[in-house]
Image: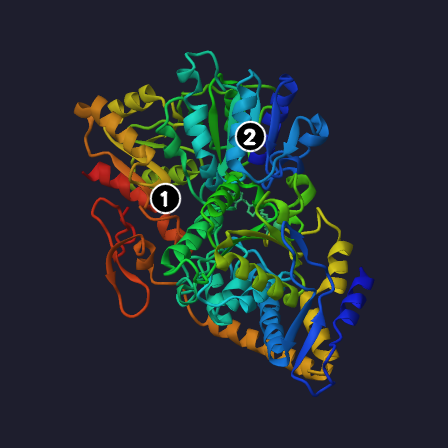
Amino acid sequence: MNMFMAINDAMRTALKSDDSAVLFGEDVAFGGVFRCSMGLRDEFGKNRVFNTPLCEQGIAGFGIGYASTGRTAIAEVQFADYIFPAFDQLVNEAAKMRYRSGNQFNCGGLTVRAPYGAIGHGGHYHSQSPEAYFTHTPGLKVVIPRDPIQAKGLLLSCIRDPNPCIFFEPKALYRGSVGDVPVGDYTIPLGKAEIVQPGTDVTVVGWGAQMHVLAKACDMAQSEMGISCELIDLRTIVPWDIATIVDSVKKTGRLVVSHEAPKTSGFAAEIAATISDKCFLYLEAPIQRVCGYDTPFPLVFEKCYVPDHLKNFEAIKHTVDF
Amino acid sequence: MQAAMKIATRAGVPHKAARGFSTSATFDLPVDFKGHLCEPPPQQAEATKEELLEYHKNMFLIRRMEIAADGEYKARNIRGFCHLYDGQEAIAQGIEAAFTREDDVITTYRCHGMALVRGSSVQAIFEELLGFRNGVSRGKGGSMHMYNKSSNFYGGAAIVGAQVPIGAGLGFSHKYRRENESDKMNVSIAMYGDGSANQGQVWEAANMAALWKLPVIFACENNEYGMGTSVNRSSYITEYYKQGNTIPGIFIDGMDVLAVREGMKFVKDYCGSGNGPMYVELKTYRYHGHSMSDPGISYRTRDEVTNVRQSRDPIELVKKRLVEAGFSTEDELKEIEKALRKEVQDALKAAKESSVPDDSELATDIYTTGKKMGDGPRLESEMPSVVRMPDITNNLHY
Ligand SMILES: Cc1ncc(C[n+]2csc(CCOP(=O)(O)OP(=O)(O)O)c2C)c(N)n1
Ligand SMILES: [Mg+2]
């Protein structure tokens, strides 16, 4: 099963197990641009799976309203780049409703799904990774899966989590990433990172599609330099699993963090700051951030822009050679 | 549908033209304008032979350009997202014919046609599509972001609806620059699609424009679908020219370049006179799918597309008029089209000889020192040290 099918399966499971769950967004009744909601309208009816007009702010607010009656709303934003019109609703309304109402109301049943990230030729507005904007907003959870198995379990967790969640799906992996996804109902806990590959020399942290780039860089470090990398998938960006990273860095003394979004104020900065605070005396080398450049996501320079395995390999080497 | 074209051509017979003699003729406009809170313009238009030939030329160039772009996209030479304008050519051309280049245009990602009529060459448009250095946006914008500063073309915009309030700001600038209250103003036109009409930003902009009586035209190109969603499924008010509520509006046949021109002259006059904004609905149809990844036949039938092509094609209508007014013969038009086809092919060939911009362009044009560079509009780039840029001299550097 590939990733779009796993996401489809997660939503089917959610709609089946929760009568209040509804799914909506631009063209989702037809299956959505990436086919994630294929067949769901036929299965659950047009009252539960429906198209919205083209209005992201409205979609987000509408979802918040429905969820604040204690029900489950799964909203799709067609591309993460289009989430910005909805930014106000998510940051000002969804995130703060519980706090400012003295916990009388919340929209915990809201999950917003959006495909993010580079796909080779998406250009400025079909490639961005906006996760860091949302991590700057207490009250929201931000989750990104790396493969179909993770996608299903994490999405179900988001849908059932009592807090509003933003679930960014690596669009580059929708078709290409395949796995033996369990057929049943299962969840993967939020706020827990996963050590994908244990190692001893350098801790390497990423999430989403970047995990595949990092795996390649770690392999390269192993085969060319004999460097043993401990590769960790953060999975939940906020609230992130500080303990797992701290434990790993205490062991390795070195950390490389990588994401596609621009370096300045990217989430790697938060991780680097926290780890240098908590692991100062354990660090053997400065923490390296391997990220997109501080440019708009470029149209013709994507190859140069993305933090590919070579750049990550360089960074790993650099921390070891330091 | 077939019948509609017959009516159109019959109605297009010039009233006062003596065949092959006059250079100007009056044409009936087959599809009625409709006015919302205003009296629509007359159902007739005057056009000279030169005008019609010019319209035909540009519209045909757009058509061929889009067909060539389709081929290049399929050959993977054009990457990214690419939205074609064929079927909608009369709108761009009609607006351009009613406007001067002092009037501003801002539109959607479906912007190739507008770029052409606003003065960009076919070759420069192809280069932009290919992401090449001499493209209309230096290869940095791509299909959805074509601009032309010299003709006040404020570009295409990938984010649906975003261009509309910007259009209101452009209109305010005209009002602000006006010396006397009684002066005629230039106008700005903010174009959007039937699907985009539902973005909140459109309504926000309309309110500002009406409140402050800005010379802004809210122009909805209604091609019946927003991606796969038909207007009935996306909009409560499907008469887009009425969406302004108490803001007046007109409905224009967007397949008839003369209707677009006459309608837009009327609207420009109204808005430019300080009466505030106006809504316009331009009824049209897109021949291709939404973008290159959409074959365009899962939510509409092949028959529907074929029918429009046969009965309402905007280029055929111009040709019929040219012939029936005695301005051109079928054979002449054939020759002209042959030459235009070649022009497009040559432009494509020339474009392909160019190449992508220099790598250093990845990090230019983000911040500027404000200093001018040369004669053009470009300003010198600045790279503040807090902003991490690639080390171009060392590609492996992260
Ligand atoms: C904010 C935002 N949301 C969604 C999209 C994706 N999208 C691009 S075009 C489009 C449909 C627009 O339809 P319409 O306004 O009718 O214009 P047309 O494509 O028919 O010219 C959608 C949903 C986008 N580009 N930006
Ligand atoms: Mg449309």
Tell me if I can see residue A235 in this picture.
no
Mark 2 / mark 1, whichever is N-terminal: 2
**Percent x, y for residue B105?**
48, 59
Q: Which amino acid does label 2 sit on?
A: Ala
Helix, strand or loop under label 1 = helix
- Residue sitting at 69 percent across and 82 percent down? B327
Which of the image's four quarters has the N terminus of chain B? bottom right
Residue B265, by quadrant, is bottom right
- Residue sitting at 26 percent across and 40 percent down? A317
Q: Is residue B95 above or below residue B162?
A: below
Of residues B88 and B243, the one nearer the viewer is B243
Q: Is residue A199 above or below residue A212?
A: above
* Residue highlighted by disc 2: A75
* Residue highlighted by disc 1: A309
Q: Which of marks 2 and 1 is in front?
A: 2
Q: In this view, does A286 lie to the left or right of A54?
A: left
Q: Is residue A18 left or right of residue B373?
A: right
Q: Is residue B382 left or right of residue A74?
A: left
Q: Which amino acid does label 1 sit on?
A: His
> Are labels 2 and 1 assigned to the same chain?
yes
